[in-house]
Image (spheres, rainbow, N blue to C red):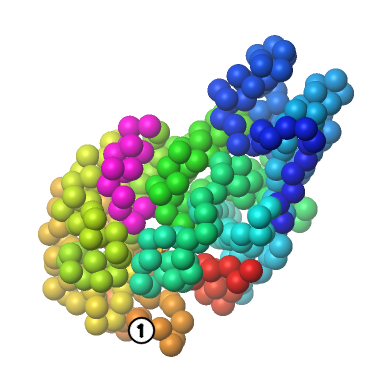
Amino acid sequence: METVSGKGGQIDLRDLTPAQLSDYVVGLGLPAKRARQIFTRLHRPGVFDFFQLGISREVTELLASHATMSSLEPATVEKSTDTTEKFAFRLADGAMIESVLIPEDGRHTLCISSQAGCAMGCGFCLTGSQGFVRNLRPAEIVNQVLAVMTHMVANGINRATSRELLNNLVFMGMGEPLANYDNLLAALTILMDDHGLGFSERRITVSTCGIVPRMDDLGRDIRVNLAVSLHAADDAVRTSLMPVNKTYGLASLLDACRRYPLGKKKVILFEYIMLKGINDSLTDAHLLAEKLQGIPSRINLLPYNGPGEAEYARPDEAQTLAFQKVLREAGFNTFIRQSRGADISAACGQLACKG
Ligand code: SF4
């Protein structure tokens, strides 16, 4: 659950970017150089209150009397047979969110949530079917990372190794990150700062269903990898799956992808959930190849993984392989991704906290 340490104040120091923290610390009458020390210590696993920061008693008491420090502890941790772990967190107001830790080749990818619930209503997504609860604050995004690192430390991994093991952060959990833009940007700024956890731009991926103006903002404001939930190469099909396509159709979405500033050797990751009889024909594959021409791309095909009673079904393997072949022959790096953690409902599109 979410806990809050500190008494008098309203400001949660874990909501603050380094620049905001510096202003705040100076406003308390402390020298600016203190802010860097406080920021570094705030973003260590296993730190739940100001007295664990390891700074002078005087400064500790000053902070504790003016500000708060929130943290998250998992309400539940479920481990899949494939070693994927799902963490459910209860926030201070009772809202539930989830994060998923996916070990792979000795490194870990952490999939984090940006909202409680989601307003985007994608038809194949359990989170979307539950509706929107609220945006997460920057601290609630950052605290997912710290809580998972704390869990790793509690399981015998030392602090430095817990950070080293956490190789990738992906904003692919609950919610549409770009619909919570300002808080996302603050959280990214915090997570990427070298005096804190120091995640590099190469190790963070923000996934969007295609909120075009915010994609432009993201490309302008910060350098991170972009993933786009595409799921169809035809407007009518995409609109039937993803209501956002009514507002931002494929042409404007793919133009935004063309404008997105990519570093050298960088690509946009396109995610394509394979739904039997809906978007899995070879005609769909050829159309997809045509639409993505000129965009440095990597395509992940995700055979549908949802509940059997749902209106969607998973294509058979031969169809998925044939679809992949068309894309590969058209020159696209295309991979079939088997969802991890399906037995604990941690796979793509399955996150939906049951409270
Ligand atoms: S797929 Fe993503 S954007 Fe769509 S409803 Fe689910 S969480 Fe929201």
> In the image, residue 134 lies at what x, y percent?
52, 54
Image side of residue 257 versus residue 34, left or right: left
The quadrant of the picture occupied by the N terminus is bottom right
Q: Which residue is situated farthest in the right direction here?
A: 57
> In the image, residue 39 lies at what x, y percent?
66, 28
Magenta region, mostly helix, strand or loop?
A: helix
Q: If the picture is divided into quarters, which one holds ligand 1? A: bottom left
Other residues around mark 1 within 10 Å, as few (<14) / some (14–19) / many (≥20) = few
Residue 8, quarter of picture: top right
User: Magenta segment, which residues?
Assistant: 207-221
Q: Which residue is nearer to you in this view: 265 or 293? A: 293
- Work out whether 65 lies above or below 23: below
Residue position for label 1: 311
- Work out whether 55 lies above or below 91: above
> In the image, residue 311 lies at what x, y percent?
35, 84
Image side of residue 59 versus residue 145, left or right: right
Residue 24 located within the stretch drawn in magenta? no
Residue 62, quarter of picture: top right
Name the kind of residue labelled 1 in the image.
Glu
- Work out whether 256 lies above or below 10: below
Q: Which residue is nearer to you in this view: 243 or 53? A: 243
Q: Residue at x 29, y 64 (%)?
A: 243
* SS type, badge 1: loop
Is residue 159 at least partly visible in the picture?
no
